């Protein structure tokens, strides 16, 4: 497969890059240090269409492709991987409502999600069911036209800040077919949030537990039929995995560009670091690996867009490879900076901290190998 971007795709990519460099990069270090959730910048991004990228135009989105979304996320992450990743999660939630919601739900939520007047979070993981997501225990029982929800979700990006939460909960028996998806609104009685987690990175977005104590959710807030919540969650993750891979590439590209500029200026033993063969070989490998990961990710984006039979495997391959390569390239960029790379006066250590979690969330990279091998071995 050859990827020759259209004029429109290049314009989209360049617009995202300009926004990232102008609106995100100058503030990213402060957001990280002071743990600022930049609502104003998120809404500026929404003004460019970046909050509902692959939502139908009929419902307030811009109707772009998964490849277009990957291009956008990569460029946004160039300025701040943490903030770009949150925009990715919001997009995943908006798509889930567009793809599986009723006309009433689309009309109620999507126009405001598209402007980020409403912000959305995804709630799947629990403290006792991380990689084994289908073992979740948060339960919702019908009660006079409502569901009473009880349980707790862990590691929720946007917890306490977001306005709606797409919650996977058990409405039936054990296993994936007993899971449904609910749209829970901030302010519903019985909904509460844990303390903000203290994290290694991703500090421009809050992470908390989300708790349900007889939380009353109207039946009309169920997304799709009962029993298809796990399907909704997994289909959402196909796109989420592409986007988080793209965020890794964007952050790593910034780290690479920063290191490239540094080695051209820094001198040791009477000459530029860039003039040592070991440095040149390292740069060559970093650039090659980034390009290989980028092409794999773009190919997977096309497969997910087209609904290919191996789309889920392709998304898992791209996520595993891009997030591993992104972290490795960033670590090499830090090494090229020597001791300075370890200091917060330089941006590399922040990128490293932000990218590390990409190998864990949206399905750990070990689970990505499970997904890939399961597809390869199925009859």
Image (spheres, grey):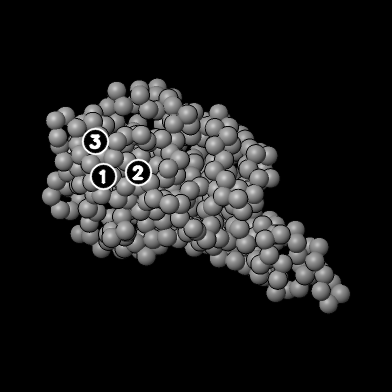
Are the residues flagged by discs 2 and 3 in contact, CB closer than 8 Å? no
Tell me which numbered mark, 2 or 3, is placed earlier along the sequence. 2
- 161 left or right of 72? left
- 347 left or right of 149? right
How far across and how far down the image is residue 195, in percent?
A: 43, 52
Helix, strand or loop at label 3? It is strand
Compared with 274, 245 (above or below) is above
Q: Compute the Cα span from label 2 to label 3.
A: 12 Å
- On the question of residue 302 being in view, the answer is no
Residue at far bottom of view:
269
Residue at x 45%, y 55% (from the top left corner): 197
Compared with 365, 190 (above or below) is above
Residue at x 31%, y 58% (from the top left corner): 127
Q: Which mark is residue 84?
A: none
The answer to which image quadrant residue 285 occupies is bottom right
Q: Which mark is residue 192?
A: 2
**Which residue is identified by label 1?**
213
Q: Quadrant of the C terminus?
A: bottom left
Q: Name the foreground residue: 223 vs 27.
A: 27
Q: Compute the Cα span from label 1 to label 3.
A: 9 Å
How far across and how far down the image is residue 316, in percent?
A: 38, 55
How far across and how far down the image is residue 371, in percent?
A: 31, 59
Residue at x 57%, y 40% (from the top left corner): 38
Tell me which numbered mark, 1 or 2, is placed earlier along the sequence. 2
Are the residues flagged by discs 1 and 3 in contact, CB closer than 8 Å? no
Are the residues flagged by discs 1 and 2 in contact, CB closer than 8 Å? yes
**Which residue is identified by label 3?**
216
Q: Name the foreground residue: 96 vs 26.
A: 26
């Amino acid at each position: 497969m050859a990827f020759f971007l259209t004029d429109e795709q290049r314009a989209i990519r360049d617009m995202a890059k300009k926004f990232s460099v102008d609106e995100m990069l100058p503030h990213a270090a402060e957001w990280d240090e002071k743990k600022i959730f930049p609502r104003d910048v998120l809404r500026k991004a929404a003004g460019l269409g970046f909050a509902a990228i692959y939502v139908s135009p009929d419902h307030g989105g811009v109707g772009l492709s998964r490849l277009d979304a990957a291009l956008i996320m990569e460029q946004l992450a160039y300025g701040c991987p943490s903030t770009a990743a949150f925009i990715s999660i919001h997009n995943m939630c908006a798509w889930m409502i567009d793809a599986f919601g009723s006309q009433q739900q689309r009309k109620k939520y999507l126009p405001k999600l598209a402007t980020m007047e409403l912000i959305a979070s995804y709630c799947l993981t629990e403290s006792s069911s991380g990689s084994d997501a289908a073992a979740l225990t948060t339960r919702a029982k019908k009660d006079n036209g409502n569901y009473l929800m009880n349980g707790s979700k862990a590691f929720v990006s946007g917890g306490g800040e977001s306005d709606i939460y797409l919650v996977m909960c058990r409405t039936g028996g054990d296993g994936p077919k007993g899971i449904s998806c609910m749209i829970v609104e901030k302010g519903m009685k019985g909904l509460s949030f844990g303390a903000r987690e203290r994290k290694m990175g991703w500090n421009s977005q809050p992470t908390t537990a989300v708790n349900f104590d007889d939380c009353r959710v109207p039946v009309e807030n169920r997304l799709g039929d009962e029993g298809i919540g796990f399907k909704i969650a997994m289909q959402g993750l196909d796109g989420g995995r592409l986007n988080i891979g793209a965020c890794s590439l964007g952050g790593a590209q910034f780290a690479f560009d920063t290191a490239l500029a540094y080695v051209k200026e820094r001198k040791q033993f009477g000459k530029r670091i860039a003039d040592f063969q070991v440095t040149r070989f390292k740069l060559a490998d970093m650039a090659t690996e980034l390009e290989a990961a980028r092409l794999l990710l773009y190919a997977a984006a096309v497969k997910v867009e087209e609904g290919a039979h191996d789309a889920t495997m392709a998304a898992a391959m791209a996520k595993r490879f891009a997030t591993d390569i992104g972290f490795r390239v960033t670590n090499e960029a830090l090494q090229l900076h020597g001791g300075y790379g370890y200091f917060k006066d330089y941006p590399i250590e922040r990128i490293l901290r932000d990218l590390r979690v990409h190998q864990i969330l949206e399905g750990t990279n070990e689970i990505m190998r499970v997904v890939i091998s399961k597809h390869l071995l199925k009859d």
